[in-house]
Amino acid sequence: MIKDANGLIDYTEALKNQSSSELKLYVSMGTCGIAAGTTPVLNKIYQTIEEKNLKDIIDVVEVGCMGLCHSEPCICLENKETNEKVYYGNLSEEQVVQILEAKFDTELAGAKVLNKTWNTPEDEEISDQIQTRIVLRNSGVINPEKIEDYVMRDGYKALAKALTEMKPAGVVSEIELSGLRGRGGGGFPTGRKWQFAASQDADQKYLICNADEGDPGAFMDRAVLEGDPHSVLEAMVIAGYGIGADKGYIYIRAEYPLAIKRLEIAIAQAEELGFLGENILGSGFNFTIELKYGAGAFVCGEETALIHSIEGKRGEPTFKPPFPAISGLWGKPTIVNNVETFANVAAIIRNGADWFKSIGTEGSPGTKVFALAGKINKVGLVEVPMGTVLRDIIYGLGHGIVDGREFKAVQTGGPSGGCIKADKLDTPIDYESLKALGSMMGSGGMIVMDEDDCMVDIAKFFLDFTLEESCGKCTPCRIGNTRLHELLEDICSGNGTMETIEKLKTLSAAIKDTALCGLGQTSPNPVISTLNNFYDEYMQHVDRKKCPAGVCTKLVSYTINDKCVGCTLCARNCPVSCISGERKELHHIDQSKCIKCGVCYTACKFHAIDRT
């Protein structure tokens, strides 16, 4: 039990003197790494260390996601004296043995060597590299199941500072001065929200961490909780002290079993050492945290629906005002922030508001974590200063489009966001800039699309998701989005007209103006943004009855031209056997049997198949 701030200092110093190994071996054990096969690699590492008697030389650290999802399984070998690090990706068990034997020989066993592309800002020093890690400062660096690792990297130092050197009002003021904005949606100022709750005269206040991450292609919050759970716990205690709450909840979807496991371990460890519970660090302040599991309803990412779910009610939103900061959980003042927002708090308290404001832009200070996904060469997690341009993320960190294809669009903000096209790639990323483009920051999903994607179909895909996830409480969302989806179906099947386009515009505007909650109000955004940015593609579907990307099967036909050499490759790959012809003779497609799958088009090596 650490009883005060001095006890934390003594505990930290004691930890620093414990390890004597020459090398540290970080093994990526987040969900992405485990799914890619890191567990057998880890087992082989332990086996080899045992067999080669390397226990005193190599210290193995099982970490969360390193952000290098494109190269899992991956490890990092660090020389503790020189701080030299080598990252290896796409590892096999056989390569691990040779790497451990040779240590820093990067050419061994054909292992893929990855360059370190991120930096953690320390004190006043701001990285000049593309990535700057604040939220992900510990992810991929510490063992999330060992509180000692967190403490060694200034963990709970901010909490000690807040409880011993600051008044509650000072904590709220520091967050407000930092300009931190909510990282889960529209970017409301975090300090202002805290101030609303702090100013309420109530016998009970609550704090909720929204970990109900549900956007397609988004996995930022999961990675933080799997790789650095104590950063969220520390921030919640600080926030509770600031607003006068002694009870916190983490609302996390049950589909995140590894994150839940590591949170449970972290909470137990924090309670044991005295960072949670009664009389924290001898300050007289009490705070407890409880986990609540969501069943995967996307609408429960909306704060009033989330609150109802915790209360045991149906997860449906309600009108605001009153806002939760005034009347939330069980009618008491309640603050709801998402995982990434909380993950910034300790760094701000520790280093100061001015330090945080020196990163990013004036209106959007700090960094933003993005989950790169889709048709991009290097999928994974990145954290960049606000104001970084899209091109640097997609072509710099993401290394461009798969197979050298042409970039077509990027969807930011998930199903509530919008598509941004190529001529806007030099737009700096901040809340206002994305909003001006008809999109939004959202939680941080970034799905990249290429020339083979149909933008009408993309709009329909996101609307499919919204229809599935709508709670159905309000008519604009329940019925309006169903009608929108039917109109898009008409366009994709060749039944669309100019009247269909006009109905899309009118209905989208009506839903935005009349839906009850944020989910319904933003659900037409993919439709509106694709109409605005890819109107010609809609017109090709309506006027020419053609899908230029070849995605809408009812508008596509495949024919074999004179370049056919009769290799039979198309016929052998056709799943419905609708292609006929002898070897070295021109082949033919039976249009009555063709299912428009495009397998023949992809398989042909002689450009002998036309897609029209």
Image (spheres, rainbow, N blue to C red):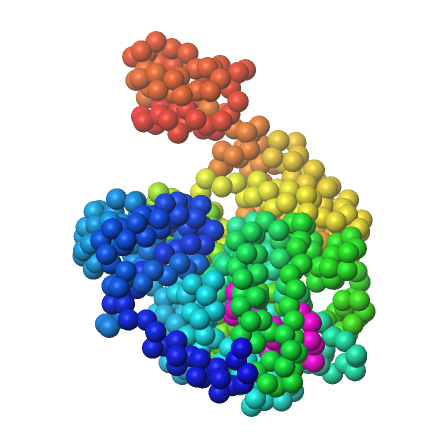
> Up-down: is 597 above or below 220?
above
> Up-down: is 54 above or below 240?
above
Most extreme residue toward the top is 582
Between 26 and 14, the one lying in front of the other is 14
Q: Which residues are magenta?
A: 229-248
Please provide percent x and percent y for residue 364: 53, 73
Between 131 and 515, the one lying in front of the other is 131
Query: What residue sits 44% from the left and 80% below the top?
Result: 11
Please provide percent x and percent y for residue 132: 41, 70
Left or right of residue 446: residue 103: left
**Looking at the image, can residue 380 be seen?**
no
Left or right of residue 272: residue 466: right
**Looking at the image, can residue 119 be seen?**
yes
Query: What residue sits 39% from the left and 76% below the top?
Result: 15
Query: What residue sits 45% from the left and 54% below the top?
Result: 30
* Quadrant hosting residue 484: top right
Left or right of residue 274: residue 514: right
> Up-down: is 473 above or below 271?
above
Q: Count up the numbered dots.
A: 0
Left or right of residue 63: residue 203: right
| Residue 239 belongs to magenta span | yes
* Quadrant hosting residue 185: bottom right
Please provide percent x and percent y for residue 553: 55, 29
Please provide percent x and percent y for residue 173: 61, 85
Query: What residue sits 77% from the left and 56% below the top?
Result: 312
